[in-house]
Amino acid sequence: MSAVESATATAAPPAGQLAARELLTRFLSGSGVEIGPGHVPFPLPFGGASVRYVDRWQPADNRSLFPELGEAAAGFVIPDVVADLDTDRLSALASESQDFVIASHVLEHLAEPLGQLADIHRVLRPGGVALILLPDRRQTFDRDRSPTPLQHLVEEHRQGVTAVADDHVEDFLRGTGDWDGAWDEAQRREVLELHRRRSVHVHTWSQDEFCEVLEHTVREMGMRWELLDAVFLGDAPGSIEFGMALRRAPGGAAPQLLAARLAAAWAALAERARAAREAGAVHEQLVARFGELSAVAEGHRLAAADARARLSRLASLPGYGLARRLYRLQRRLRRGAR
């Protein structure tokens, strides 16, 4: 399959028309790859970027594994690079060969995410950008599962794990309520293998828990990530994800400083997003109150218009002028009597 390219002549769409996640693609240009694009490859609305796809399965295999997608399964793309990310990672790509790498809802499916992050860093040119999005476990079917501890990831990386362990698949099935304790051993093996092939959520994080993972990759693994921007829960209605644009920084700064800068940038962006959400909530309340007051004012206006119409009809009746003069005379007589 040839690379999919966003035409450079296409003007960037207005920011207000883009989802928060798509705004992160403003940092992507040149040529890069998306790993695990699934049936919804990541959009590149700003142009100037060409992307190739890295995936394990051909479209027919994916359609067979995910029959529940129905017609949406037509979106599965033919991979330009066929690779099992658990065993091959990005070994087919040369070091410092990519301007960007997109990993949208991928890392949580892998047997060993730290190794994949290291390979993403390896294939990026200095100044290249990694676009990473993940589901927040609190907003998905993982809400009843425990977060993956950093030390667990470190141990799996040390061991060089290349296959999702049974315990992980079982934890996923128990957490989603799909585990049947009555299965015999053959049934259990069949179910575990099917869900291993379907690539379940092996690991789970919230947005703040994953920041700790990134800090570790910088402080202890030699990756030189700089945080360009991030999206958080609540940035879009009904969002279940968080994401970030990370740049592979050139050499110079010490790992401890880079890690501290990353953590500080994450906290600052999270605070900015929180303040924007609160301001948006206040704005919505003001708009709602304005609507209520406008409705009351409109009611008064209609009542006044109705009163004027009724008065006009009375004025058109025979004897209205005489009755009005008699009424005024009666009022003057009463005031004079008092």
Image (spheres, rainbow, N blue to C red):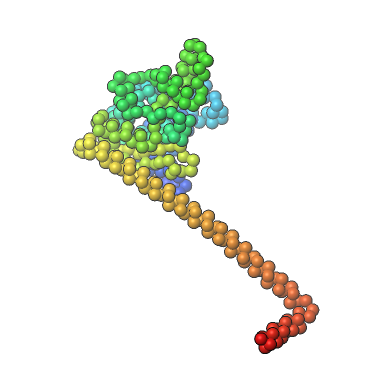
Q: Is residue 177 left or right of residue 94?
A: right
Image-quadrant location for residue 35? top left
- Quick one: quadrant of the C terminus? bottom right
Q: Is residue 195 left or right of residue 229?
A: right
Residue sitting at the far front: 338
**What's the residue at 41%, 43% (across, down)?**
23
Q: Is residue 302 left or right of residue 268?
A: right
288 up-or-down from 219: above or below: below
Where residue 88 sits in the image (x, y, percent)? 35, 21
- Quick one: quadrant of the N terminus? top left
Where residue 256 sits in the image (x, y, percent)? 22, 36
Image-quadrant location for residue 68? top right
Q: State whether residue 258 appears in this view.
A: yes
Image-quadrant location for residue 6? top left
Query: Camera-side residue: 292 or 280?
Result: 292
**What's the residue at 35%, 34% (across, down)?**
210
Q: State whether residue 7 appears in this view.
A: no
Where residue 209 sits in the image (x, y, percent)? 35, 34
Q: Is residue 333 left or right of residue 220?
A: right
